[in-house]
Amino acid sequence: MSTYKALFFDVDDTLLDFCAAENNALQLLCKDQQLAFTQETETSYKTINQQLWRAFEEGKLSRDEVINTRFSLFFKEWDQEVDGILMERTYRSYLEQGHQLIDGAMELLTQLQHKYEIYIVTNGVSRTQDIRLRSSGLHPLVKQIFVSEDTGFQKPMKEFFDYVFDRIPNLVPSEGLIIGDSLNADIRGGQKAGLDTCWYNPNRVVNQTEVKPTYEIQSLQQLYPILEK
Ligand SMILES: [Mg+2]
């Protein structure tokens, strides 16, 4: 048996299918604005959004700057002037409805909750993440949820993990494993905090970074043998 006492799970695209939730919300928003939802519009939004969140992870933008400007920037690409803040509010109400599980997530947490302390570590908006975790049915299976908005810091910042460990007495980082899909936020962040790391990489993306995870998996089911080692 592995010596881990605690497992730290990322949420988006690790336990919950954020891509599906995001696509659905974006589609509804485009419909509201009478903008055709195509591969092009989808890609345009994702590019803008990823650039902004990346700047957030690097500490260059605040969370509010990200979420309140992404839709004004996106619709501007399609010659529409919109109120970014109002649009974000509508988008969020659509996003909160999205709680599609990643294959195997429910079974995984159901089985592991008896053997490990399970924590959630997620960058995002507290209310949205809370609603999605509750409606997905995962909420009762986790011991505590840490959302960047509440901590004042975000993964991969060391301060985010300091906040987490300050609130988990009797646990040292070497007793924990973080599981997430982001090499930067989850794996690099986890390493900085002294955790072992497991990169969930279902699309078999080639790792061209200097960040080397302890483990790499393509499906959540592949976590079982790692924990049984
Ligand atoms: Mg993620």
Image (cartoon, rainbow, N blue to C red):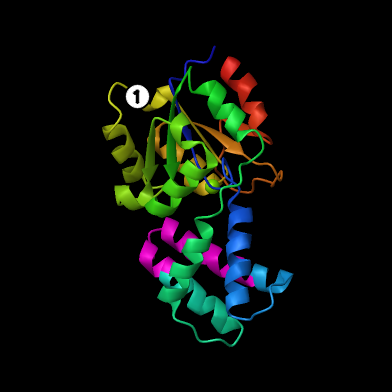
**117 shown above or below 81:** above
Along the line of sight, the residue nearer the viewer: 221 or 88 = 88
Rendered location of residue 184, percent (x, y)? 51, 48
Write the residue at 69% across / 46% down: 206
Quarter of the image containing the N terminus?
top right
Q: Residue furthest top?
A: 1
x then y, percent, for residue 147 = 38, 46
Q: Is residue 9 above or below residue 225?
A: below
In magenta segment, residue 129:
no
Q: In which quadrant of the rendered view does residue 158 lie?
A: top left
Q: Which is the main secondary structure of the residues drawn in magenta?
A: helix
Bounds of the magenta segment: 44-67
Residue at image point 45% right, 63% down: 55
> Can you see residue 229?
no
Front-lying residue, 156 or 181:
181
Identify the residue at horizontal 41%, vertical 39% (top origin): 192
Q: Quadrant of residue 119?
A: top left
The residue at which mark 1 appears reads as 172
Mark 1 neighbour class, 10 Å CA radius: few under 14, some 14 to 19, many 20 or more: some
Q: Is mark 1 within 8 Å of ligand 1?
A: no
Residue 145 in the image: state x and y as whole percent.
39, 39
Note whether 4 is above or below 207 in the view shown: above
Left or right: 173 in relation to 96: left
The answer to whether residue 46 is magenta is yes
Q: Residue type at mark 1? A: Val
* Callout 1 secondary element: loop
| 129 horizontally vs 164: left or right | right
